[in-house]
Image (spheres, grey):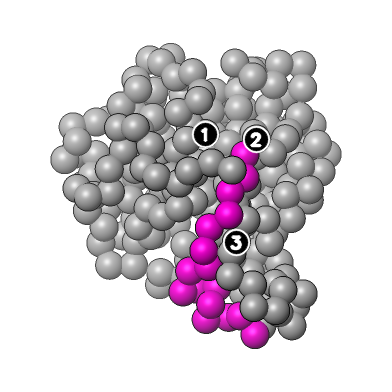
Amino acid sequence: MTSTAPAPGASATDLIALPGVYRPQADTWFLAEALARESLGPRTEMLEIGTGTGVLALLGASRGAQVTAVDVSWPAVVTARLNALRRRLPLRLAHGDFAARTAGRSFDLIIANPPYVPAAATRLPSHGPERAWDAGPDGRAVIDRICASAATRLKPGGVLLMVHSGMCGARTTIDRLHRAGLAAEVTASVLVPWGPVLRSRRAWLERQGLAADAQEWEELVTIRAGHPENPGR
């Protein structure tokens, strides 16, 4: 178990968040703890997939990394820009699909807190706050794309850090990363109370076999991956 309090140097109190932008929650701070354990510096090229308010990208920038942050939501991109200006930290921001916006580039560190909440709809939402969490019937619509593309976007010795719900299958993520040529492992897990999104779809989750009757706690996992010949920096 680990805590989910804001990481050192992080604060949600002074963050701007435009309507519909995902505010930092337990999974954000859980990933921030993993980020804090990585070695960063002026030569570190870092990518954040799904930046939201930009808080994790700004944590990387505050430690000297050259950070690119991508989000499919225009309000999120504007929010991250405003927060970067308030903190006087440099961010390279891009709007759109992470794969398209980073084509041909590679990074020393990739971090992702992707949408991972299972949803009845097979098509991902194209607008609204649900874009930050809805991820198809198994919650893996974005996770699987990250797994498939990470190997080509990591420099030698580079690291992928990703957080998602245990409901999505940590073993599946590890297996997909292995098939993509990466060494991967779960480095931490924590139980957090169900939030309003999960509670609102409890009956459906139970019918799908994704949640037990009267379940009130969700497991979050942090996964770390890298090329097997040099999985860590």
Three-letter amino acid code of the residue under disc 2: Thr
Q: Residue 218 bears which disc, if any? A: 3
The image shows residue 70, relative to residue 214, as above or below, that is: above
How many marks the image carries: the answer is: 3
Taking the spot 53% from the left edge, 68% from the top edge, the residue there is: 194
> In this figure, which residue is indicated by the disc labeled 1?
34
Q: Which residues are magenta?
A: 188-203
- Is there any visible trace of residue 135 in the rendered image? no
How many residues crowd around disc 3 within 10 Å: few (fewer than 14), some, or many (20 or more)?
Answer: some
Question: For residue 147, which quarter of the picture?
Answer: top right
Taking the spot 76% from the left edge, 16% from the top edge, the residue there is: 229
Query: Is residue 201 inside the magenta stretch?
Result: yes
Q: Is residue 65 left or right of residue 189?
A: left
Q: Position of residue 212 (x, y in %)?
A: 72, 74
What SS does tag 3 mark? Answer: strand
Q: CA distance from mark 1 to mark 3?
A: 19 Å
> In this figure, which residue is indicated by the disc labeled 2?
187
Disc 2, disc 1: CB below 8 Å? yes
Three-letter amino acid code of the residue under disc 3: Glu
How many residues crowd around disc 2 within 10 Å: few (fewer than 14), some, or many (20 or more)?
Answer: few
Three-letter amino acid code of the residue under disc 1: Ala
Q: CA distance from mark 2 to mark 3?
A: 17 Å
